[in-house]
Image (spheres, rainbow, N blue to C red):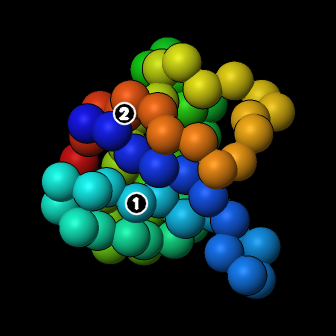
Amino acid sequence: MKVMLRNNNEGHLLAYVAKKDLEEEVIKQEDTTDGKVFTLANGWQLAFPTLTDPFKLPQTIEARRLA
Protein backbone atom coordinates (compact mmCIF):
# COMPACT_ATOMS: atom_id res chain seq x y z
CA MET A 1 0.00 0.00 0.00
CA LYS A 2 1.11 3.56 -0.62
CA VAL A 3 1.88 5.55 2.53
CA MET A 4 2.72 9.24 2.71
CA LEU A 5 5.18 10.21 5.43
CA ARG A 6 5.40 13.78 6.69
CA ASN A 7 6.08 15.81 9.81
CA ASN A 8 3.27 17.71 11.53
CA ASN A 9 3.58 21.23 12.96
CA GLU A 10 5.03 19.83 16.21
CA GLY A 11 7.72 17.88 14.36
CA HIS A 12 6.20 14.42 14.91
CA LEU A 13 6.31 11.88 12.09
CA LEU A 14 2.88 11.09 10.58
CA ALA A 15 1.84 8.29 8.25
CA TYR A 16 -1.15 8.76 5.94
CA VAL A 17 -2.77 5.78 4.16
CA ALA A 18 -5.08 7.20 1.47
CA LYS A 19 -6.99 3.98 0.72
CA LYS A 20 -7.98 3.72 4.38
CA ASP A 21 -8.31 7.50 4.92
CA LEU A 22 -6.07 7.01 7.94
CA GLU A 23 -3.54 9.44 9.38
CA GLU A 24 -1.69 8.40 12.53
CA GLU A 25 1.41 9.45 14.42
CA VAL A 26 4.41 7.12 14.32
CA ILE A 27 5.14 6.17 17.93
CA LYS A 28 7.97 3.66 17.37
CA GLN A 29 10.61 3.03 14.69
CA GLU A 30 12.67 -0.15 14.37
CA ASP A 31 15.26 -1.51 11.94
CA THR A 32 14.49 -5.17 11.14
CA THR A 33 15.09 -7.72 8.41
CA ASP A 34 11.93 -6.33 6.71
CA GLY A 35 13.55 -2.88 6.56
CA LYS A 36 12.23 -0.04 8.70
CA VAL A 37 9.14 -0.91 10.73
CA PHE A 38 6.96 1.91 12.05
CA THR A 39 4.35 1.36 14.76
CA LEU A 40 1.43 3.78 14.49
CA ALA A 41 -0.64 5.19 17.35
CA ASN A 42 -3.56 2.90 16.39
CA GLY A 43 -1.37 -0.23 16.73
CA TRP A 44 -0.69 -0.87 13.04
CA GLN A 45 2.84 -1.91 12.10
CA LEU A 46 4.05 -0.91 8.65
CA ALA A 47 7.24 -2.26 7.02
CA PHE A 48 9.15 -0.03 4.59
CA PRO A 49 11.74 -2.24 2.83
CA THR A 50 13.18 0.56 0.65
CA LEU A 51 13.33 3.39 3.20
CA THR A 52 16.86 4.47 4.08
CA ASP A 53 18.27 6.97 6.59
CA PRO A 54 18.16 9.88 6.35
CA PHE A 55 14.85 10.05 4.54
CA LYS A 56 13.42 13.23 3.04
CA LEU A 57 9.93 14.34 3.98
CA PRO A 58 7.27 14.51 2.73
CA GLN A 59 7.38 11.43 0.54
CA THR A 60 5.09 8.65 -0.62
CA ILE A 61 6.50 5.15 -0.39
CA GLU A 62 5.31 1.56 -0.72
CA ALA A 63 4.73 -0.21 2.61
CA ARG A 64 3.44 -3.55 3.83
CA ARG A 65 1.16 -3.91 6.86
CA LEU A 66 2.50 -6.41 9.40
CA ALA A 67 -0.10 -6.11 12.15
Q: Indicate whether 13 appears above or below 38.
A: below
Residue 7: x %, y % from top left: 68, 65
Examine the rendering and report whether any part of residue 56 can be seen: yes
The quadrant in which residue 10 appears is bottom right
The disc at residue 35 is none
User: Which of label 1 and label 2 is nearer to you?
Assistant: 1
Residue 16, labelled with which disc?
Answer: 1
The residue closer to the viewer here, 2 or 48, is: 2
- Is residue 27 rendered to the left or right of residue 24? right
Earlier residue among tags 1 and 2: 1
The residue drawn where x is 29% and y is 68% is: 22
Residues at marks 1 and 2, CA–CA distance in whole angstroms = 11 Å
- Residue 4 percent coordinates (x, y): 47, 49
Tell me the kind of residue under disc 1.
Tyr
Element under disc 2: loop
**Residue placed at 64% from the left, 50% from the top?**
58
Neighbourhood count class around disc 1 (C-alpha, 10 Å): few under 14, some 14–19, many 20 upward: some
User: What residue does disc 2 label?
Assistant: 63
| Residue that protrudes farthest toward the bottom in the picture | 10
Residue 26 versus residue 2: which sits nearer the camera? 2
As helix, strand or loop, the secondary structure at mark 1 comes to strand
Q: Residue at x 38, y 29 (%)?
A: 62
Q: Are marks 1 and 2 in contact (CB under 8 Å)?
A: no
Residue ID at (62%, 58%): 6
In the rendered image, residue 44, in percent from the top left (x then y), is placed at 30, 57
The front one of 26 and 28 is: 26
Mark 2 nearby-residue class (10 Å; few <14, some 14–19, many ≥20): many
Q: Does residue 66 appear in this view?
A: no
Q: Is residue 38 rendered to the left or right of residue 8?
A: left
Amino acid on which the number 2 mark rests in the picture? Ala
Q: Quadrant of residue 26?
A: bottom right
